[in-house]
Image: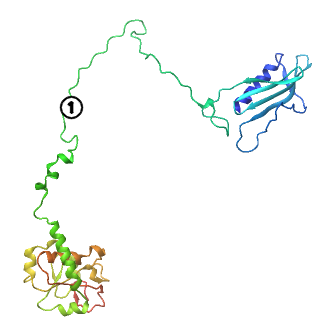
């Protein structure tokens, strides 16, 4: 549309036959075009022809005399981008094309599909490569640039690139990856056996008290700090990380000795002495399975969660009553 308005002013200026003449618009009825025009309304414009200018013009010369130029009608075709003007040829009307403006690739007509002008021109690649002239501004030849000697390649660094996993014998050789002190399959068997025993050996508060005889060992696997704060009276402390065959043999007379265990998640309302653990990571599981792995199968576990202030099991320690 911007190009069309520009073409309008170019045409009006071209029609003025006198230098310095001023175009003057008169109030006459618009001239009807040979075909119906659709005025642009609100919203996106549809492809069509629109009236840009439809008036009778006259010009004034230097003496002030008015000369009529006749009716001037300009139309814009949004489908082609052409601007046309209406002329009278004898008793008939005819349209003449003023110009077909080059439309920028990123500004097609509003609401109109992409036209041929939206395609960017295809430029042929240059057939030559510009090179700087071999002479200086005063005409003398340029001195040849010194040729740098070839640099030796940098030494290979042992840490420049990581060794692929398949080339690392420490990760791929089965003989080197086996640790005789780590038995994963045996651990799974101990856990499975502990699960079968726990189904029958998890006891309540009254049964735990009944089993806590002089022949039994009450084993507390919590840390030394937690044990010092509060523990079951008569229990012995062996922190879980310190469990070994020798330490168990020192505290438990034989593999047939009855062992009673309890852990953090058995007592509530004393977070400093019994800090709660995630249920699936409760120390009860680990302690039971570890004792089974060391050959101690006469194990009983305190099952319920008890309030330290209401339980019948006697407690003692720095935080005790």
Q: Is residue 225 left or right of residue 92?
A: left
Query: Could you tell me which residue is drawn at 41 percent across and 6 percent down?
Result: 139
Task: Look at the image and tell me whether residue 277 can be seen.
Answer: no
Instruction: Identify the image quadrant of residue 11.
Output: top right
Check the image and report above or below for 87 versus 30: above
Residue situated in front as seen by the camera: 249 or 312: 249
Colouring rule applied to residues? rainbow
Lateral position of residue 245 relative to residue 202, left or right: left
Tell me where residue 214 appears, x and y as whole percent.
Answer: 12, 91
- Residue 291 horizontal side relative to residue 275, left or right: left
If the image is split into quadrants, where does the C terminus sit? bottom left
Point out residue 17 in the picture as x, y percentages from the top left corner: 83, 16
Residue 268 position (above or below residue 214): above
Q: Nearer the viewer, residue 219 or 93?
A: 93
The image shows residue 41 at horizontal and vertical percentages of 76, 42
Along the viewing direction, whichever of 38 and 42 lies nearer the viewer: 38
State which quarter of the image contains the N terminus.
top right
- Up the image or down, 2 lies above or below 229; here it is above
Identify the residue at image location x=30%, y=89%: 309
What residue is rendered at 14% in x and 51% in y?
Answer: 170
Q: Secondary structure at mark 1?
A: loop
Question: Can you give x and y, in whole percent of width and height, for residue 112 in the image?
Answer: 67, 38
Name the residue: 84% across, 19% down: 21
Inspect this view and state whether residue 280 appears.
yes
- Count how many numbered circles sit on residues in the image: 1
Residue position for label 1:
154
Horizontally, is 278 left or right of 107 in the view? left
Q: Residue furthest right?
A: 65
């Amino acid at each position: 549309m911007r190009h069309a308005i520009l073409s309008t002013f170019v045409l009006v200026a071209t029609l003025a036959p006198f230098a310095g003449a001023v175009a003057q618009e008169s109030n006459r009825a618009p001239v009807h075009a040979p075909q119906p025009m659709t005025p642009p309304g609100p919203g996106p414009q549809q492809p069509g022809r629109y009236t840009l200018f439809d008036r009778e013009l006259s010009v004034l010369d230097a003496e002030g005399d008015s000369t009529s130029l006749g009716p001037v009608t300009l139309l814009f075709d949004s489908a082609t981008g052409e601007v046309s003007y209406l002329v009278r040829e004898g008793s008939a009307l005819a349209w003449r094309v003023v110009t077909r403006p080059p439309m920028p690739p990123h500004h097609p007509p509003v609401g109109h599909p992409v036209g041929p002008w939206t395609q960017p021109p295809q430029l042929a690649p240059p057939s030559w490569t510009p090179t700087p002239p071999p002479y200086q501004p005063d005409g003398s030849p340029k001195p040849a640039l010194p040729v740098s000697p070839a640099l030796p390649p940098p030494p290979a660094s042992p840490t420049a690139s990581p060794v692929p996993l398949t080339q690392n014998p420490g990760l791929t050789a089965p003989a080197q990856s086996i640790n005789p002190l780590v038995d994963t399959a045996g651990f799974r068997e101990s856990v499975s056996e502990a699960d079968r025993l726990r189904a029958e050996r998890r006891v309540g508060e009254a049964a735990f008290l009944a089993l806590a005889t002089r022949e039994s060992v009450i084993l507390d696997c919590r840390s030394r700090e937690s044990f010092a704060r509060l523990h079951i009276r008569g229990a012995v402390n062996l922190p879980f990380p310190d469990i070994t065959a020798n330490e168990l043999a020192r505290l438990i007379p034989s593999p047939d000795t009855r062992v009673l265990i309890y852990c953090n998640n058995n007592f509530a309302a004393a977070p400093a002495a019994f800090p709660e653990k995630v249920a699936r990571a409760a120390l009860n599981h680990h302690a039971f399975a570890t004792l089974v792995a060391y050959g101690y199968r006469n194990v009983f576990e305190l099952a319920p969660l008890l309030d330290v202030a209401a339980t019948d099991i006697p407690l003692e320690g720095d935080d005790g009553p």
